Structures are given as structure tokens and as C-alpha cells.
Amino acid sequence: MNFDIARKRMVETQIVSRGVKDRRLIEAMLKVPRHVFVEEAMAAQAYSDTPLPIGEKQTISQPYMVALMTELLELSGREKVLEIGTGSGYQAAILATLADRVYTVERIRPLALKARRALDLLGLLNVNIKISDGTIGWEEEAPFDAIIVTAGAPDVPDKLVEQLAIGGRLVIPVGNQFEQILVRITKQEDGSLDRENVTGCRFVKLVGKYGWGTEE
Ligand code: SAH
């Protein structure tokens, strides 16, 4: 399997053809080897148009969803970004390529450790990972120019809105456990919030103090 060819094809047929325009993002998706973020047995499927299991009942998001959410953050290269739900670390790798610094929070330790190894392998040293409940954000490092939540939330956690810088963008799937709407919140100059509904989506649960309970 030639991963470079598979990745190029992924970007053409799943990302560009569906309307993603951000040149830097397209370059990042051509560059970051997605197969490094899945189990070896799944490497051949790493560039397929679908989410994939990464263990612990979690998934790495579909490539197009990663691209869409990242484009909504409108990164120019100078930003400090917060991600909730590190999972495989693939989304964090894309963010790290496009922003200045990435802070990512994962509640499941084995996933965080695996993600760390993959990011280190690629030399992405501008990613900080914390094992914690991301629904409370990362207070010590706030404010963030962009925040991305890669798990489905019942509501937008207030703490994340509080930790968003003026002018900052927060992208989060909001809904029930079976379907969500991808929401983008922009914090205006006067502190008011602009809320846009982007598209339907389906993510694993955001579990935590301001998310779902573990039993639900
Ligand atoms: N961005 C990931 C997708 C991960 S799936 C990737 O690129 O692979 C969602 C992840 O969110 C899961 O790993 C899950 O354990 C994690 N998660 C769910 N609730 C969380 C919470 N409250 N804080 C941190 N991580 C959480």
C-alpha cells in the first residue's frame, strides 16, 4: 500500500471535491500521515471516507469531518488552540501544523499515551496533552483563539465559552447521543456570542462534569 498516493486521493476525493478551500489546511492534510494514528491492522483503511475504531470504544473522525471542523476555526498560524477529545491525536496533528500551540485534553489515559507517541514520532512538539475532563476546559492556559470539541455534547459547556478569546471560534457538536448539529460560536468584540448551525453530524459522547454521565 502506498500511503502517499492514498492520502493524495483522500484529499482530492473527500476534501477538495466537497468544497474545502483553505489552502493551508489542504496542505496539512496532504502532509500528516493519518495511518500513524490508527492500529497497524487498520493502516490500509486509514484513508477511507469513514471514522475508524481506535480502541476504548472511541473513534478517529472521518477525514472530511476533521477538515470541515478545522476550516471553521479559520487558523492563520498564530493561534493558541484548545481541543477536547484527543482520541488518536490525528486532529491535534492537523491543528499543530496550522496553529502556533495546541492544548488537547483526553479523559482516557491509554488513548492519550498512544496519541503522545504518534505526535512525538512526527516531531509535533507544539502539542500539550492533559489527561482530564475537558468539559471544564484548561483554565491555566486560557484564553484560546480557537476551541474544538471532537465529542458530542448535550449543551455548549459554559467553561469553554468563558475560555474563548475575544474574536475566537468554538466548534462543537451539540445534540443527543445519536445525532448532533455542528455548531460554531464566535465571541464578538463586545463579548456577545454569534451562533451558527453548520451541519448534522454524529460523534461519540462527551463524558464529563458538563457533558454526559458515564451511565447514560
Ligand atoms: N479528535 C479525535 C477524535 C476522538 S473521539 C481524533 O482525531 O482521533 C472523541 C474522544 O473524546 C474520545 O477519545 C473520548 O475519550 C474523548 N472524550 C470524551 N469526553 C471527554 C472529556 N470530557 N474530556 C476529554 N476527552 C473526552
Image: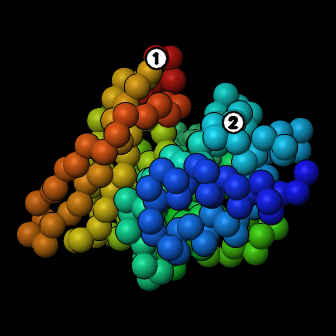
Which residue is at 70% across, 69% downward?
31
Please tell me whether residue 187 is drawn above or below residue 126 in the rendered image.
above
Say whether residue 164 is left or right of residue 9.
Answer: left
| Residue 174 in sight | no
Q: Which colour scheme is used?
A: rainbow
In the image, what residue occupies the spot 34% across and 40% down?
A: 199
Up the image or down, 175 lies above or below 94; here it is above
Question: Which residue was labeled with disc 1?
Answer: 216
Label 2 is placed on what type of residue?
Answer: Leu
Q: Is mark 2 on a helix, strand or loop?
A: strand
Circle 2 residue = 52
Quarter of the render that holds ligand 1: top right
Residue 187: image location, x then y, percent: 20, 63
Q: Is mark 1 on a helix, strand or loop?
A: loop
Cα separation, mark 2 vs mark 1, equals 23 Å
Horizontal and vertical percent position of residue 191: 13, 65
- Residue 151 is at least partly visible in this image: yes
User: Label 1 is placed on what type of residue?
Assistant: Glu
Residue 102 image point, x, y percent: 53, 68
Crowd class of label 2 (few under 14; some 14 to 19; many from 20; radius 10 Å) = some
Q: Is residue 186 above or below residue 214?
A: below
